Image: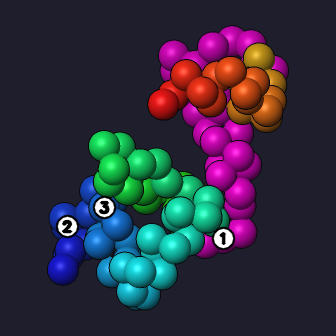
């Protein structure tokens, strides 16, 4: 079990299940369906603690990303371009290239 002092910014599926106090199978199901903000890396799920906390507050993953735009010194000056990139739908060719 993770203590307050051991919290990390990125959680595994097991850590997120403990954080949410639900079973790992529930977390996997929600993640597989795109209902949780997370990414699969090498077949393993990873979750941003901040994105999950914002999701719990009712914010969508896109809203979470947009809410962070401009929060860092080195962010691009043109935030409209960042917002447009987040909101645009991917070209089917882009998705095929990820395989």
Whether residue 48 is visible, yes or no, is: no
**Which residue is tagged 3?**
12
**Which residue is tagged 2?**
5
Which of pointers 2 and 1 indicates the residue nearer the eye?
1
Q: Is residue 25 above or below residue 95?
A: below
Q: Quadrant of the N terminus?
A: bottom left
Binning the other alpha carbons within 10 Å of mark 1 as few (below 14), some (14 to 19) or many (20 upward) gives few
The residues tagged by marks 2 and 1 sit, at their Cα atoms, a distance apart of: 23 Å
Residue at figure coordinates x 71%, y 46% from the top left: 62
Label 2 SS: helix
Residue at figure coordinates x 32%, y 54% from the top left: 44
Q: How many marks?
A: 3
Q: Is residue 54 above or below residue 40?
A: below
**Foreground of the two, 90 or 60:** 90
Binning the other alpha carbons within 10 Å of mark 2 as few (below 14), some (14 to 19) or many (20 upward) gives few
In reply to whether residue 76 is colored magenta, the answer given is yes
| Badge number at residue 40 | none
Residue at figure coordinates x 31%, y 61% from the top left: 12
Which contiguous range is marked in magenta?
Answer: 54-80
* Occupied quadrant, residue 57: bottom right
Q: Is residue 12 found left or right of 32 in the rendered image?
A: left
Residue 17 image point, x, y percent:
37, 78
Residue at figure coordinates x 62%, y 59% from the top left: 34
Residue 10 image point, x, y percent:
34, 53
In reply to whether residue 68 is colored magenta, the answer given is yes
Q: Earlier in the sequence, mark 3 or mark 1?
A: 3
Residue closest to the far top = 77
Q: Contact (CB < 8 A) between labels 3 and 1?
A: no
Which of pointers 2 and 3 indicates the residue nearer the eye?
3
**Which residue is tagged 1?**
57
The residues tagged by marks 2 and 3 sit, at their Cα atoms, a distance apart of: 17 Å
Label 3 SS: strand
């Amino acid at each position: 079990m993770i203590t307050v002092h051991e919290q990390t910014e990125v959680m595994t599926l097991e850590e997120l299940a403990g954080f949410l106090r639900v079973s790992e199978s529930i977390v996997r199901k929600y993640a597989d369906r795109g209902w949780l903000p997370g990414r699969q890396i090498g077949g393993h799920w990873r979750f941003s603690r901040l994105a999950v906390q914002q999701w719990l507050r009712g914010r969508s993953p896109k809203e979470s990303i947009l809410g962070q735009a401009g929060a860092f010194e080195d962010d691009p000056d043109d935030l409209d371009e960042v917002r447009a990139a987040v909101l645009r739908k991917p070209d089917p060719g882009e998705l095929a290239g990820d395989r």
